[in-house]
Image: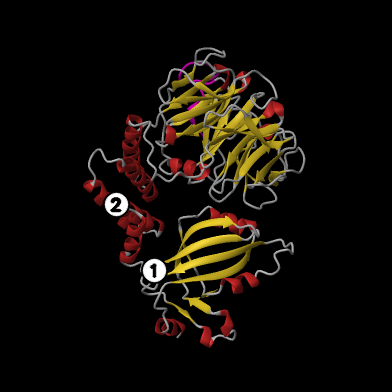
Amino acid sequence: DIHQQLQKSQSKRPLQVYRSQLMSIDELDGLKNNIGQFISINSMFSTSKQRTTALFLLGDIKTQIDSERVLFEIDADPKIVTTKPFANISKHSYFPDESEVLFMIGSIFRLNNINRNDDQIWIIKMTLCNDDVHDLKQVLMYMKQQIENEETNLRTLGNVLWKMGKLDLAEKYFNRLLHELPLNDPFLSSLYKDLGELASQTGDYDMSIQWHQKFLAIKNKNQLTVNPTIKKTNNSIEQSLILNHININTKWKQHGITMIGGNGRGNQLNQLDHPRGIYVDDDHQTIYIADCWNHRIVEWKYGANTGQVVAGGNGQGNRSDQLNRPRDMIVDKKNDSIIICDDGNRRVVQWSRQNGKNGETIISDIDCCRLTMDNNRNLYVSDWKKNEVRRWKQGEREGTIVAGGNGEGNYLNQLDCPSYIFVDQDHSVYVSDRHNKRVMKWMKGAKEGIVVAGGKGQENSLTQLSNPQGVIVDHLGNVYVADYFSHRIMRWREGSCEGSIVVGGNGKGEQSNQFNSPTGLSFDVQGNLYVVDLYNHRIQKFNIDLN
């Protein structure tokens, strides 16, 4: 068979080979988001030893086409491979001059980097890796060439096993490393984080919380220490990992702790004025608040008594150093920037976290209400006047409508004053459809949405919502929503006709178990709930009730 023939003709020395291909921008973006990861090829993989041959097959570069021109540059070492051979098959080919090298189906490559050259061709560099998934010895040998110390090798091996679905083996290697590391080793923090996320995936939520508590204890102790080996996740993935150890039986303590504000309405650094959006950054132990009527974004470190202005704060206006009623913001960790919904100026601006003095407008002429980002770093913005949600991919100018866009109304293909949005890992978009008193789910590519909460009028029964605001969805599809006029936070099970009260629901007020119009919602890595309490000008934290 082909496998035996390739094995018989297996190349004896390292080769660099090439393959040309036309790709859609979506396919290319998918690869860009997986640099450093492993790719398995599910068909026979044909390449050429001659770069000029591969380039010729891309056609005339002066001719405009709808696809992206891509050239793979692959380094292949026969010493790495044991069960998936590759060989020069020129003498068996119809085109011997092409110097064809064929790789066996199932070959595994490491995606090293992607860059565009001066001819506007995307160069994708990959390295052939070992494919023996039974004992992974060669994978570990390969890892040792990439990483200097043994401890990191074990963690990397554990992560490879995890991605392959071998959770028990991954846990075994993580625990082995845990017992070998000294108590002051800088890798402990990231190892605790890995163990916590692994435990949540296996359903051991109690153990997951314990590991995350150990992770945070180290982070609190060494707030200024940055571990370069910790992989920063995209925002929506990070939010999903946070929620993985929350289940339908999870309860929160009914009396909140005032974390930010609560000192009356004002513009001092210990005060807020009509706060709206919230973003919790566990990596930096920081909470960001859209301090709407102070026209600024403030940053509060965990446990701090005052915040600091990181964007705006120079009065209400439309200069590049000003904001006008900002409603929401997210942190783009890859660019180390804050992306802000600057509603009063009808724009979305990006502000550097490194002492940025001015913002850069990235979307103009939009009545933006709220925004979020998915795991491909695509930006989603709700437009409360056009009654739509648009998605902007990197570099796009117009964006694509992903929810609504059919005028104001209450049909399933319409929205009426959309506000908060959440995007899950499948790129389904959840929208707080305020004036329709419902939360809608629009699956990727759908022409209409599904009502997942409310939609039965404005009252305070468990089947209804009154002006829904902040929305978060956990890995089970349960929807958490801030019920603005009912002064409560609700949870709706997937497919349920009614919700349950998570916190609040004790009437409008300023007591620790009350709200006065809750808006934004967020969870931290431990599953503690944060609520923006609009007219009390404060942020309330509700700890998970472990009892």
Relative image position of residue 83 (x, y in whole percent): 38, 75
Q: Is residue 177 left or right of residue 238?
A: left
What distance separates the C-alpha of mark 2 from that of mark 1?
23 Å
Relative image position of residue 139 (x, y in whole percent): 35, 63
The answer to whether residue 504 of the structure is visible from this angle is yes
Determine the residue positioned at 32% across, 33% down.
217
Q: Nearer the viewer, residue 351 or 258?
A: 351
Which is in the foreground here, disc 2 or disc 1?
Answer: 2
Can residue 505 be found in the magenta stretch?
Answer: yes
Residue type indicated by callout 1: Asp
Can residue 21 be found in the magenta stretch?
Answer: no
Relative image position of residue 242 (x, y in whole percent): 44, 40
Q: Read off the residue under disc 1.
A: 131
Q: Nearer the viewer, residue 535 or 368?
A: 368
Q: Secondary structure at mark 2?
A: loop
Determine the residue positioned at 32% across, 34% down.
218
Whichever of labels 2 and 1 marks the residue nearer the N terminus, that label is 1
Q: Read off the residue under disc 2.
A: 149
| Disc 1 crowd, CA 10 A, few/some/many (<14, 14-19, 20+) | many
Residue type indicated by callout 2: Asn
Q: Is residue 258 left or right of residue 405?
A: left
Magenta residues, start to end: 500-515
Q: What predominant SS class does the magenta segment belong to? A: loop
| Disc 2 crowd, CA 10 A, few/some/many (<14, 14-19, 20+) | few
